[in-house]
Image: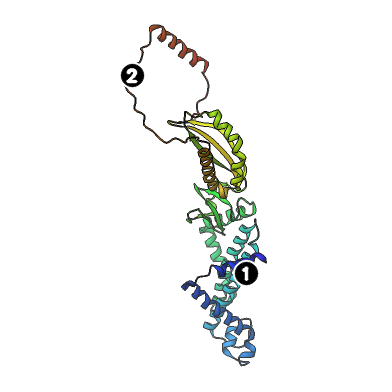
Amino acid sequence: MKTIVDNIKNYFKNFKFTPAFAVKCVVALFVVTYYVLLIFGKWIFAPMSAFYRSLNFFGKAGEFNVAVRIISYFFFFLSVSWIIRFLLKQLSAPMKKGKAIVDMLCSLIKYIAVIVLLFFILKNWVDTTAILAGIGIVGLVVGLGAQPLIADIIAGLFIVFENVFDVGDIIVADGFRGTVKEIGIRTTKIIDTGGNIKVMNNADLKSIVNMTNQLSLAVCDIGIEYGESLERVESILSANLAKVKENIPDIKEGPFYKGVAELGDSAVIIRFVANCDESVKYQVERDMNRQFKLLFDKNNINIPFPQLVVNEPISFENATTTDKRAAERFVAEQKELSKGMAEADRVE
């Protein structure tokens, strides 16, 4: 209940009047008027009012106006569907898990409401038995020709009930990384940090990486000058890593110093790692960059930038005959000693 109240407060706090809001208000006014007439109509209209008989399709006495009856169908079934889906979403708002099931139920309710609406509309002109028989035949034909749709529905059910991922989880699907916005009967919507939404058929979600279930690794690589004493830098880091963690509350574990990651062209690259939630991974990496930069500045540890060094031509000594023979023996010896060692993991 508190969450619902907070949502209402936030809605009014961020409220802006738009044409879409005006349309919603008009539709809501018509719906409220419809239910007032439907519930209190027997006291408002005459006992044999043709309009009320047409509006109240629960009653069976007398003739009715088909147009009014169809409008009544639209208001009743679509509004009931919307109310049920709205209540389900509000009740699921505080839930950390299970939102996918609610989304799928909402999607199913929407489709059922449309099907029932069409059934009741057709009932005004066609016999109910004929409609049911026709639905059976149409269902068979559609079932044979809509196998991809059936595959999407089945895949969606497996995703939900096997808890592969839930609404709000961060996943990587088909190379697209984003947060699951909605899991429907047929499709799943994923939104990335830029607000782009990728809609994928459930049957196409075959290779999924769920980044939410486990802590993610944030990596920070920083270069120091070759002239810096590595032991001095490591000593400073040893005394300050705990302070770095205090300044980055999103870090769950770490940061840890992993050592020298690379001997670059103009810098010695040292690496730090930390575990955090996937949703804040990139922010944690940016925060670590900032904290280590401030720490290095404070302790006069230089972070180099690319430089071009021009040297005067120098003469090199030629190898002697003895040097050449020794080199040949060394190369042959090393080849023999390293024979059979795999090089597949070498980083190019």
The residue indicated by pointer 1 is: 84
Q: Position of residue 295 (x, y in %)?
A: 54, 40
Quarter of the figure that contains the N terminus: bottom right
Please say if 189 is above or below 238: below
Quarter of the figure that contains the C terminus: top left
Please say if 198 is above or below 70: above
Task: Indicate the secondary structure of the residue bearing disc 2.
Answer: loop
Residue drawn at the location 54% of the way across and 43% of the way down: 291
Residue 19 appearing in the image: yes
Residue drawn at the location 58% of the way across and 32% of the way down: 235
Residue 101 in the figure: left or right of residue 291: right
Q: Nearer the viewer, residue 65 or 79?
A: 79
Please say if 56 is above or below 91: below
Q: Nearer the viewer, mark 2 or mark 1?
A: 2
Residue 195 in the figure: left or right of residue 132: left
Q: Position of residue 180 (x, y in %)?
A: 56, 55
First reached walking from the N terminus: tag 2 or tag 1: 1
Q: Nearer the viewer, residue 256 or 178?
A: 256
The tally of labels here is: 2
The residue indicated by pointer 2 is: 314
Residue type beneath disc 2: Ile
Q: Position of residue 289 (x, y in %)?
A: 51, 42
Mark 1, other Cα within 10 Å: few <14 / some 14–19 / many ≥20: some
Can you tell which mark lies on residue 61?
none
Residue type beneath disc 1: Ile
Marks 2 and 1, Cα distance to the nearest angstrom? Answer: 84 Å
Residue 130 appearing in the image: no
Task: Indicate the secondary structure of the residue bearing disc 1.
Answer: helix
